[in-house]
Image (tube, rainbow, N blue to C red):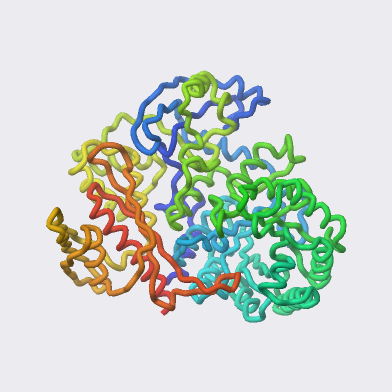
Amino acid sequence: KREAMATAFVSRDVSTTATKWTRRAKGGTGPGVRSTCARSCTTRTPSCSASSRETVAWAKRTSRRGRAGGKTRAVADNESGLEESAAADAFQTKQRPKYVPNSIDDPNYVRIFDTTLRDGEQSPGATLTIDEKVQIASQLSKLGVDIIEAGFPRASPDDFKAVQLIAQTVGTTAQPDGHVPVICGLSRTIKEDLDSAWNAVKDAKLPRVHTFIATSEIHMKHKLRMTEDEVVENAVNAVKYLKGLGCNDIEFSPEDAGRSNPEFLYRILGEVIKVGATTLNIPDTTGWNLPLEFGELIAKLKKNVEGIDDVIISTHCQNDLGLSTANSLSGAQNGARQLECTINGIGERAGNASLEEIAMAIMLRGDQELGGLRTGIVPKHIHMASKMVSEYSGMVIQPHKAIVGMNAFAHESGIHQDGMLKSKETYEIMSPETIGLNRNVEAGIVLGKHSGRHAVKTRLSEMGYVIENEDLDEVFKRFKAVADKKKGIQDEDLEALVSEHLFQTTYIWELLEAQVVCGTMEMPTATVKMRGPDGMEHIESVVGKGPVDACYKAVDRIVKSPVVLLDYSVNAVTEGIDALAVTRVSIESTDERLSYESASGLTRKRSFTAQASDTDIVVSSTRAYVNALCKMLTVLKNIQ
């Protein structure tokens, strides 16, 4: 059933990948403006004569409350969403080269290798369900990613199923331009890993296995306890074994290459090329290298590794020193033609190189400073991919994050606002529409408790959410419940309600009622009513240390799935005493079946994050907790 649903999901039209996931953008993430350029181009570059002649029909200042903290926003006329979409498409004018594992017929084309579903998911608290992984993979395909590293199949049966399902669905479905992404699985050089990775991806149209072994002296001595000869033998045997299985697209990584002896790198890379490796990935595993240093390493490899002209050089840069994007671009300048990255830069420790930063840097500066480099990324899908990954993983995007942060297009300084009102190119090098973040002028409709379904649907459509039928019914039901308690529903409120519904994939348990009694008597009591998977209603009353603690204990008594609460946070969507509260909860199960072995060989426990919103903090908190439990129970159900 899951496979059939996933197949249907990825087979839908690219403009509406799945009705409830299609979102052109949101109008209130942060202040910003757009301009009308004579070339229908949404970049902002001083050298663009057409951009300097841009005209703005009108502009005004508005003071809005909400996540922008009451900042003044410059808002410009937005007459046509189709015009902006076409402008963003103008970036991708050249045809994508035909995929050949070990070569690219366009010397300036850079492949984008996304590892959000593998390295990104290794971030603490970033556990994804199978359905969530398939939906993210589908969005990455729309985004134009060349290779999707769908996971580490040997880690657990759940990971294997997810990678296999992505290979069978996303990996066999072409986008309107004919693009089908390569589906890749990660593997150590262990036979069982190699078998698992190949079996998981082999149903894809373009399957790849990515195998690795550490090559730095630190790793070989303390982790592997192997000699250089033993490491080379393991690497060569792994590539040979994959070839014997029928895999003709093999990526090899010398882990911790950034701290490895260059002479040893020349040797091991040359040997794996001889036996069939098609892509050589050079990881700065600990984020140790500086941009000039990493670029020189790539240049040395091109010069000294035998047979390297017959393979693709790749980079994988961690962000421990905040240099992952710079190192990746330096690698591309020196001959790397595949860059590994993740949406929002999520990943181990400080994260990975950010896909959106790499893609936009190459898009905006590729011709001028990078020798004409280009990618196949379709930028208008960046914002949706970013939001989807953030909501599913529970990894909140920092406000000042480049490209996709809430303040990326915000202008608070008076000097900046004055410049923006006179000409957008004074302080913006790209417009928000480029990444699919459309700015809509106020529609003149004030939403409140008397508003009907059509008004709500219209406003959601203007915000970029296209929802119908049952989804619209559920969102409207929540809208009415909030509108009865809060005067005037703002865009931020609507998005909080929609996000909770759309990004919660499975409802195993449903919260029906929650009531608390608390005060100075130090006996907070909660009564919770829930509907279970059997359709029966369950009620429990529990005394706790506080109202939220009492509710959580009541839920635990009903669900009977022990967990550890890792993180709990509440934020107001807007200002005011009647503001909608968004609660984010992260939990960890005590069930050993949810433990897994990471690519580094460590055993870890999965954690699950979810959020909910309501004008009542206790209700918001309880619903978020139930949502997180539902995610965990879904994964357990798949394991069983």
Residue 459 occupies quadrant: top left
Query: From what the image shows, is residue 12 above or below residue 51?
Result: below
> Is residue 409 visible from the viewing direction of this image?
yes
The quadrant of the image that shows the C terminus is bottom left
Q: Residue 414 in the image: x percent, y percent?
A: 47, 21
Q: Residue at x 60, y 77 (%)?
A: 196
Q: Residue at x 45, y 28 (%)?
A: 412
In front here: 561 or 199? Answer: 561
Q: Residue 142 in the image: x percent, y percent?
A: 55, 52
Residue 351 is left or right of residue 237, and the answer is left
Query: From what the image shows, is residue 4 above or below residue 303?
Result: below
Query: From what the image shows, is residue 625 above or below residue 333?
Result: below
Residue 9 is left or right of residue 475, and the answer is right
Q: Residue at x 41, y 21 (%)?
A: 60
Q: Residue at x 70, y 39 (%)?
A: 366
Residue 360 occupies quadrant: top right
Q: Residue 53 in the image: x percent, y percent?
A: 60, 19
In front here: 85 or 157? Answer: 157
Residue 579 is left or right of residue 519, and the answer is right
The quadrant of the image that shows the N terminus is bottom left
